[in-house]
Amino acid sequence: MSTPAWDGLPVLATTGVGSLPFVEPADAIAHVTGAYQVPFCPQLPHRDGDMIQEWLGSDPSRCGWSPDRDRERPVAWDAFVAQMRDDPPAHGMVKLQVTGPVTLAIALERACARRGLSAAARELAAEIATWLAAGAAGQVGELEALGVHPILVVDEPGLAAAGLSREHAAIWDPLRAAAGNWGVHVCGAVPWSLVDEVEPDVLSFDLTRGALEPPARQTLDRLVRRGGRVLWGAVDPVRPGDVETAAARLIAAMFSLGELRPASHVVVASLVSPACGSGRLSLEGELRLAATLDAVAGVVRDGLAIGRARQARR
């Protein structure tokens, strides 16, 4: 695991999941560099299409796979690279997203009126992973040439429903090889056993779905133990709720891992994001979401600092 800039990140650094409701790339880039501590190259559904269309083209219902589906760069890419060239973050880390190979393979299966992920579709997912990795490696290389360290996150929202087991973990190997730091985002139910076998450097998931069960805590503990990072999806984009409730949820989750290892280790290995992308929200909704997320991270940081001060006085 190559982590040249992890230690420079603020405690509980904030970032987004991927999609934003902006139309103009310049506006989106100004937002991600101002509202989030780890900038990310945004996906713009108003311009790119949804997470399937962005990668499969304007006719995602067309059955089959061919190289002409290649859409290697999101519409905001050039503006993002220009921003990273002119004013990179001081800590040097940014985030990239690609729609995952399993998600794309399932979309193609549905276009062909087939359900689920058959053996043939699993082979297709592996082929798509190789294609995605080639494009992602180019993006990673462009940013690394600027002295920026990308985290490549593969978006697999419905992974638990794909029917995969631990033996299918190699599907993501090409994407693992495309970046020094790579991760997986799951905004639905998380197949913890599979994720444990995949061993991403970063796991991004929806914390608002409920308390962490033992398999989740064990997988996250092993992730932290090997030097990885947990990207807690602490705020629901559609119903952000109040800051105090989200902060309490995040603290409880981090300390539940503290049963297995010191909670301070978990905090240092934690980042914070919304539970999923905000591309279908209004602009006002995204601004409110980013502000809520920043406030949640601040409340948790302040709470942890107070707790450490009290311990020091004992």
Image (cartoon, rainbow, N blue to C red):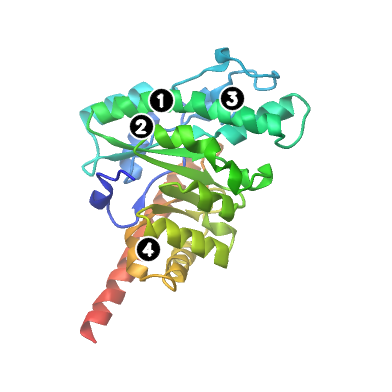
How many C-alpha atoms fall within 10 Å of the one at disc 1: few (<14), some, or many (≥20)?
A: many
Q: Position of residue 283 (x, y in %)?
A: 48, 38
Contact between marks 2 and 1 (CB within 8 A): the answer is yes
Q: Secondary structure at mark 2?
A: helix
Where, quadrant-wise, is the C terminus in this rendering? Answer: bottom left
Q: Residue at left 62%, top 52%?
A: 189
Mark 3: which amino acid?
Gln
Residue 53 is marked as: 3
Quadrant the N terminus occupies: top left
User: Mark number for residue 266?
Assistant: 4
- In the figure, 260 relative to 65: above or below? below
In whole angstroms, how far apart are the C-alphas of marks 4 and 2? Answer: 30 Å
**Residue type at numbered disc 4:** Val
Residue 175 drawn above or below residue 290: above
Identify which residue is drawn at 60% across, 35% down. 102
Which numbered mark, 3 or 4, is in the foreground of this view? Answer: 4
Kind of residue sitting beneath label 2: Ile
